[in-house]
Amino acid sequence: MAEVELKDVVTGIEKLFKGHTHFVFWYDKEGEFADNIDELGHQLTEPIVIMQPRTQLKTKIELLDIEKAGGKALVYAAFSEPDIHQNLLTDMILYSKKFTADMNVMLLHELGLPETELTFVQGQRKFFAAKTRIAKFKQRYQRGKNPEQVELAAIAKTNDLQLSNILIEVIKAPTLLDEFAKYQVLETFWSFVDRAYGYHGKHDLQELLATMMVNFAYYQMELDLPVMLRHYEVSYINNVVSFMLNWRNRNDTREVYKQAAAKVWRQLDGTQIFKNLKIADLLKADTFIEFDRHAVKWLISELLAGHLGEVINHMTLPAIAEKRGKMYFSPEYQLAYNMTVDAHNVLLPRENRNVDQFDDLIQAYITEDYLVDTAYRRYINALDQLPATQVDLFDNLSRNVESAYNNEHLVPMISDWCQDYVPNMIEPQRRERNFYSSTVGPNKDRTVVIISDAFRFEAAKELQQRLDKRDVFGTEMQYAVTGLPSVTYFGMPSLLPNHELAYQGNKELLVDGQKAINLEQRMHILQTIEPQSQAMRLTDFLSLSSTEQKKYVVDQKVIYFYHNTVDATGDKPASEVNVFRAVEDAIAELERGVDRLRTISIRNIYVTADHGFIYRRHLLDSTDKINLPSDVDFEQKNLRYAIGSTDFDEIGVDNVKLGDILGNDDQRFVFYPSNANVFSVPGAGQNYVHGGCSPQEMIIPVLHVTTESRKSQATYATLAVTDSSRRITSHEVIVNMVQNDPVDETHRAATYALYFVDGNGRQISGEQLVHADITSINVNDRLIRRHIPLIDQDFERGGQYQLVIKNVEGNTSTLIDYQMDLTVGGGFDFDI
């Protein structure tokens, strides 16, 4: 008997009878199983017709009778199949199945491979020795595909047969190379790699990755490989670039790429081989994370040198940082790039303004100057979150930013403010104590007021920008000016309805003779003026269920919500260093709060604050402090204000009568530094301050938000190809596009993946990403160009191919038809 077990013969024959097959023909040319036919007949479901030599006609008649009766049978012949011209059963064989007891042939048929692949099966008996591996192969095999590539994919456990995906799996798990060697396909793998990428190096994975990354880096920089790196040259650069693009754009291999690139950098001694690159060239590339470190160092050096205008190709430093911030390693360096932009905004010289009156100072702050406070806040907040490996880059810049913010922004601004500040010069409707009568009272609709303790004007502007990005909100920013001292125990009562405010001392301001220290007292004052009023902490309200929230607001005309994230952090010495992080948190919390109110049909919302604050990171020294007279009695002394009954003269100290602040005849004085300094008082915590006279402390936001309960109608910003000719004439296709609409409240930013496919939907190019996030209304600013490298392969000249524009977030695609006009191609017998 042959090496094949009888049970395997039975299994093989029974498989062939599945479906509508009537006959299975078995020509056993050596007659190896002639003695086993009886035993076989007992195990088979179907009967056996034994055909003797020269009995073809008799057998055919017998088979026709069986077929006519709807039966099935195995036809066994202990001789070779006759030539087609001498075989009377040829016609029946054509619609039947043939069986052979040759294990290789049996396996060939089971795998669905053509007869031409018998040699492959014979050579891979070790791989096919396990049923699990046979199953994996069959699961992946498609007619016409290279079986060796299918085997590689099965070993690598990837369902995608393309060499690029097999290679990515190898990079993820280099031990797969040992598996390839075990099953004798390692040389096949390297043969595919050599042919697909025109790779000429040694068969070593690390050497291959170095070759690919070097070529990709110089491709990005649009430069030829220098002489010293010519040994890394490849024949098919487009295939290398396509592989690199597709690998890098996969979310599941990002960490693998980072680790591989870091290892290649060390292998190449990247610092040495890339040291002579021009910065204009290096800024185009993001192959290695070290390029980003170099880019950040260069941006910082330019800022320190005072180069605050255009620097390269008509681009400013912020524009360059923004562009780099969208490249591959932006997640690791986004904070750093943002910091260079914010530093640029702080370091820009402050314009000399001819200010005639106090209102001009207010307008300057609420239109432009607040942006410097925002930039400084973002810079310091990012600095606190920087990875430890990047902190040293910013040491010198941080000193310059700190100096510029204090000496060129705060000091002159606060000096100008204090010089012109007169309480009665502020328009009545802009005074904090008139907030209710000028803003809340006139509203006929239900009005919700959110008071966020120490929520500065500049932070409210950022909240406004976030809300403006959504078409379910309408916003309008106004402002109010606090009295002095600009503190909570003055600000919170002043925001309530009032006819008379009176300071009782001991940090207590009475509203029409009533205390207004706690929530219950403030709600009582509200209900005195409007019985249908409520007051609650915002966090408590948001913790309620939707049903409870709706029940709370029903039939109410005025609702005050109190929020305290910024001041609760800044007022504690132990946590004041985190106050800018608290501002970020407050913005996010208020955005969620406003959105939640929208969902329960609150249409009319005001976001305001009781006061602002000043925060500086540098430690104050004796030159920043003012000593108050020791012979004067003060009711209150704090860093930025003091209250007392006796006037005095002191350089750097101004005062205003409390009665002028409150609109009564109180003759006590509020004293305050007439500059950015603080009073020398006991206690810790001197970086976060408020209570004094400055736009940062006194200008509070009055952000009016109107809401829509409908679902947002906003759609993703889209791209349109502007090229008039849709013909592919080069292995690198230049695609010109326009972002159809600017990103605004009705158009959301989106990321698109661009690549070409053939008529079967198979990707034939690298994948380029486009960030459709441009906000400019100028269409010229929304023009976009991408170079998409095609894989080197045979193309059908005149054939139809398609550009895919895939929305990564929305998972939708647009297809643009292109006609192929390439005359030559590569040509591979495997998928790359």
Image (cartoon, helix red, strand yellow):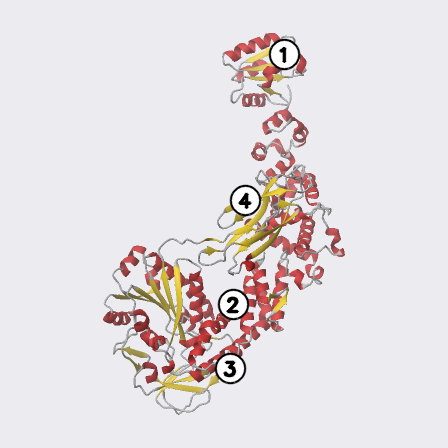
From the image, state whether disc 2 or disc 1 is nearer to you.
Answer: 1
Residue 237 x, y percent position in the rendering: 69, 48
Amino acid type at image mark 1: Leu
Which of the 4 image quadrants contains residue 203? top right
Query: Residue 446 appears at what percent x and percent y?
Result: 29, 63
Give the residue type that dot 2 points to: Asp
Cα–Cα span, label 3 and label 1: 111 Å
Label 1: state its secondary structure: loop
Residue 437 is left or right of residue 269, and the answer is: left
The dot on residue 621 is 3
Among the two numbered marks 1 and 4 on one chain, the one whose residue lies closer to the N terminus: 1
Residue 407 drawn above or below residue 718: below
Q: Tag 4: Cα neighbours inside 10 Å, few (<14), some, or many (≥20)?
A: some
Marked residue nearer the N-terminal end (4 or 3)? 3
Please name the amino acid that badge 4 sits on. Answer: Leu
Q: Earlier in the sequence, mark 3 or mark 1?
A: 1
Q: Is residue 49 above or below residue 13?
A: above
Q: Quadrant of the C terminus?
A: top right
The residue under label 4 is: 815
